[in-house]
Amino acid sequence: MKQSLYLEIEGVVQGVGFRPFTYQLATTLGLTGWVNNSSQGVLIRVEGDRPVLDFFLSRLLQEKPALAQIHRIQLSWGDSIGLDQFQIKPSTGGDKTALILPDLATCSECLQDILDPHNHRYHYPFTNCTNCGSRFTIIEHLPYDRPNTSMKQFEMCDRCLTEYQDPLNRRFHAQPNACSECGPHLSLWDKTGKILAFHHDALLATAAAIRQGKIVAIKGLGGFHLVVDARNSTAIQTLRDRKHRPHKPFALMYPNLEQVKVDCQVSALEAKLLLSPQAPIILLERKLKRKPADQAWGEQDTIPYLGVMLPYTPLHHLLTRELNFPIVATSGNLSGEPLCIDNQEAIHKLNKIADLFLVHNRSIVRPIDDSILRVVGGQAQIIRRARGYAPLPIKLKNNLGSQEHILAVGGQLKNAIAFLKSNQLFLSQYIGDLETVATFKRFQQTVEDFQELYELKLAKIICDRTLIINPQTMLNN
């Protein structure tokens, strides 16, 4: 007699290819039923003979997608109701507890796509699939479906829609799925906002400007970078003067790991971190006999490290391959202010720093800086938790026994917020020092953003006494 198995799965199970994986596994085993996203995670109902269902469950847990993390699974058995096929059903609502995946670096398959002249995504700087690309920076509401992201304004062409609807394709329900025919595109602006070039021509013109020593503000995944040739001491000094940043170090983006190894000592763990889906900035010990981009890092005699990252979006890959040398890629903001994420905002605030602006027409829902890590004693330590890591929670060993939503608003310096739901502690992306009105507003926006994303009903707020904040006002709002 056939039985039915119903599964409720919570964790990192949306935007990682969990539904097509489930579909392929169920159909391969001849099972019927359905799978869908919910605001809690993924729901599955499968029907078949009990030994096959047991085998399905075992393989589901052992062979789940590489990026998936199952934090909780609840299952129940029942009688079959006679479902005759397996399908992927539309998403459902409910209490919002599903985990939002961080933005992830370009995977090897998508990198091959943009470098293949015979692929229709050749040189397309917004290529992605379920294994990589934008997540946290584009989602507006849960569940994670395209209408709930900033990609909703881009209607997929027939070719992209076919991929999106095919459970056997790695772009099945990849919410940012697009190509040059239907998706976001690049344009190069001057300081007044006049358009100088479009598409790949804009990227080539940007590369030419960087070679000439120009400063270019580039809109990336979670905000703008200010970019110059890391070998050009005059250009770097100009950036320091214009940004009023005489000594603080600048991060460097290298085209590939081989060039990093020429300038820095790189351990196996550091290399693994640089090449990971999180693709953070890693503090690396420089080779003292070489002085790469000395002005980029500041006082080299006292700080023997470079902050290094590798390209993590198709745009970065295409640009650095065109240049084939390291670039300074520092946060696109005024001193003490938050990262610029809007094209017009960047023109207004950065036009006295940047000579040109490489922008695109996909909205960034929330800003996020590059994460910074350092390896100490063979262990990776996070110095700044942002892109690639936020907003995944830290799962506490014990449930605190309270269903109340508790918010911790962080300190005045190096601010980030956190909130507690059951035994999960959610950390926001790095916000910064709350010393300016603009940064404090960004802090308030981040609090409101998390409340809206997860429908938080705050019962308690934990804050430092020095933080200028009225907790009761926040609770009332």
Image: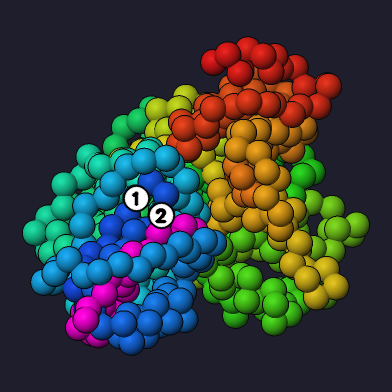
**Residue at 47 percent of width and 32 percent of height:** 455
Q: Quadrant of residue 379?
A: bottom right
Residue 55: image x %, image y %? Answer: 37, 85
User: Which of the two residues, 125 or 453, is positioned nearer the viewer here?
Assistant: 453
The residue at 33%/87% (across/down) is 51
Q: Is residue 22 magenta?
A: yes
On the question of residue 433 being in view, the answer is: no
Is 59 in front, or is 289?
Answer: 59
Q: What residue did someone put label 1 on?
A: 38
- Tag 2: amino acid: Gly
What is the quadrant of the C terminus in the image? top right
The image position of residue 195, as x and y in percent, is 29, 37
Q: As shown in the figure, which amino acid type bears the numbered disc 1?
A: Ser
Identify the residue at horizontal 73%, vertical 73% (top origin). Answer: 264
Q: CA distance from mark 1 to mark 2?
A: 5 Å
Q: Could you tell whether 453 is left or right of 416 in the image?
A: left
Can you see residue 173? yes
Disc 2 target residue: 41
Which range is magenta? 1-30
**Secondary structure found at label 1:** loop
Q: Residues within 10 Å of mark 2 (few under 14, many from 20)?
A: many
| Residue 23 location (% of width, % of height) | 25, 72
Location of residue 283 with respect to 385 vertically, above or below: below
Image location (x, y in percent) of residue 422: 61, 45
Give the quadrant of the N terminus: bottom left
The quarter holding residue 373 reads bottom right
Q: Secondary structure at mark 2?
A: loop
